[in-house]
Image (cartoon, rainbow, N blue to C red):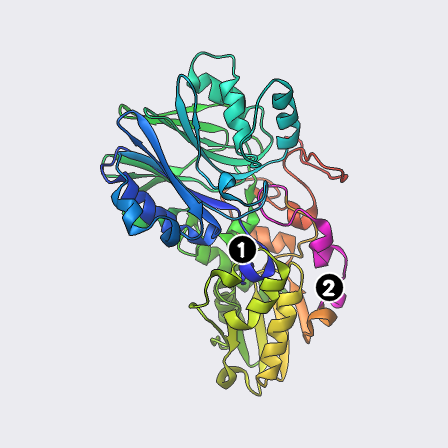
Amino acid sequence: MLAELKGLNEECGLFGIWGHPDAAQVTYYGLHSLQHRGQEGTGMVLANEQKLTSVKGEGLVTEVLTAEKMQTLSGNAAIGHVRYTTAGGGGLENVQPLLFNFQSESMAMAHNGNIVNADQLKSQLESQGSIFHSTSDTEVLAHLIRKGGSAELKGRIKDGLNSLKGAYAYLIMTDSELFVAMDPNGLRPLSLGLLGDAYVVASETCALDIVGAEFIRDIEPGELLIINDKGIVSERFAACKQRSMCTMEYVYFSRPDSNIDGINVHTARKNLGKQLAVEKYIDADVVTGVPDSGNSAAIGYAEASGIPYEMGLLKNRYVGRTFIQPSQSLREQGVKMKLSPVRGVVDGKRVVMVDDSIVRGTTSKRIVQMLKDAGAKEVHVLISSPPIKNPCFYGIDTSDKDELIAAKKSVEEIRELIGADSLTFLSVEGTVEAIGRPFEGENRGQCLACFNGKYPTEIYSDQEIDYIKC
């Protein structure tokens, strides 16, 4: 699925390294491999000679971290960030990592996720004299740390983290230490690796592979890692609650060569496609996927159904960032620029089109029409996830229920709107089983809130929402 066109977007990716002489260069490659997680801003903070140096800007990694800038950066530790605008809006002041210079210390901070009680905490902090320099929820933790009662930074970080509700993976760096934290529900992926004697942390294991780091393990929910020149220490700032990894990380967000809790993303998507074939067999001539994340599920469906898989849709990889913007008009205009049907594959055929999700329905409608214009006799749309009926408050830009077509229309009404000959969504139960996370419980350690409305944390909003009390 083309998330940049549909509006289903992750908000950022994290990369950090401690103890490497070429920390800036390694971080550059790590961020480049995470570019799919955010294309609107990127930044890096280096630790060098007891000081922190920042470089950041709006744009892609290659646009912001140019060769000229990279030549000026040095240090043996760094944290980096790629961002998609969700909470807090855009603007250079919201591009991370955020760098704070206090009288007695300096601290850089990068965050993946969304703090659902950020507004309440901001109000409290401002009433106590805090002045915020960005509209990002990430900054809240910096003020909590600064106002913490403990003299030790580690203690203040733990106290601050325990005040937060929602999804968060944090990298916090000083000139002498790197702190790594994961929320008690583990809603976002974060992995630890080793590159020579240097420790590496990344939102996805694909970034570890790109820089040549050996994967050690995933960061645990409620865990705080402290990394410095003496080594690494693992502590807890909170008990592990109900594991709730975002299901959409498997379905769409993560790169197919990444692993989450030991499960390869490509394999998970193939299994989702195979489960679709179990739940709904279509008498058709060809199976095709909507690039890129729909391809793996399409391959799985083809293998399980026995219907040939073909590349019926071609993605144009040379369209500029004009069409990777969070506005509906640009998304709609970008569909034809991003995708082209392969007439020789679909002409005169009954086509099974596999996609990972439907958010608003506008893009699915255009793709179905493109296939029919290219001669497809029938277009049957199969979605390798359940209908997205509920907003996400954990860092995906679907916080408005009115934007979700499945929240307002039945499957048949959606089918009519997109012009498909049939439309099938994967069941919630089938999704959980196909991904096969290695944890016990009904949800197998997954967050399914966007499908079933059961949120793993309290939600601070005007809507009446059930949440799973852990």
Q: Is residue 162 above or below residue 314?
A: above
Where disc 1 sits, the SS reads helix
Disc 2 marks which amino acid?
Val
Q: Nearer the viewer, residue 359 or 23?
A: 23
Front in this rendered view, residue 274 or 190: 190
Q: Which residue is mark 2?
A: 411
Indicate the quadrant where residue 14 lies. top left
Residue to which mark 1 is pinned: 251
Q: What amino acid type should be assigned to the residue bearing mark 1? A: Val
Residue 376 image position (x, y, % from top left): 59, 83
Q: Nearer the viewer, residue 182 or 218?
A: 182
Q: Quadrant of the N terminus?
A: bottom right
Q: Quadrant of the C terminus?
A: top right
**Residue under the point 51% across and 69% down:** 338
What is the magenta range?
393-414
Residue 264 lies in the magenta-colored region: no
- To which quarter of the image does residue 469 belong? top right
Residue at position x 33%, y 47% in the image: 28
Q: Image height check: is 147 above or below 182?
A: above
Asked if residue 403 is among those painted magenta in the image, a careful observer would answer yes
Task: Please tell me whether mark 2 sits on a helix, a strand or a loop.
Answer: helix
Of the numbered discs in the image, which one, if any, rests on residue 18? none
Residue at 58% x, 45% y: name it: 86
Whether residue 33 is visible: no
In this rendering, is residue 342 above or below 79?
Answer: below
* Horizontal relation, residue 458 to residue 347: left or right: right
What is the x, y in percent for residue 21?
Answer: 22, 37
Q: Is residue 230 left or right of residue 118?
A: left
Instruction: Sort mark 2 into few (<14), some (14-19) or many (20+) by Cα contacts within 10 Å.
Output: some
Q: Position of residue 225 (x, y in %)?
A: 40, 28
Q: Residue furthest bottom?
A: 348
How far apart, in angstroms, are the residues tagged by discs 1 and 2?
20 Å
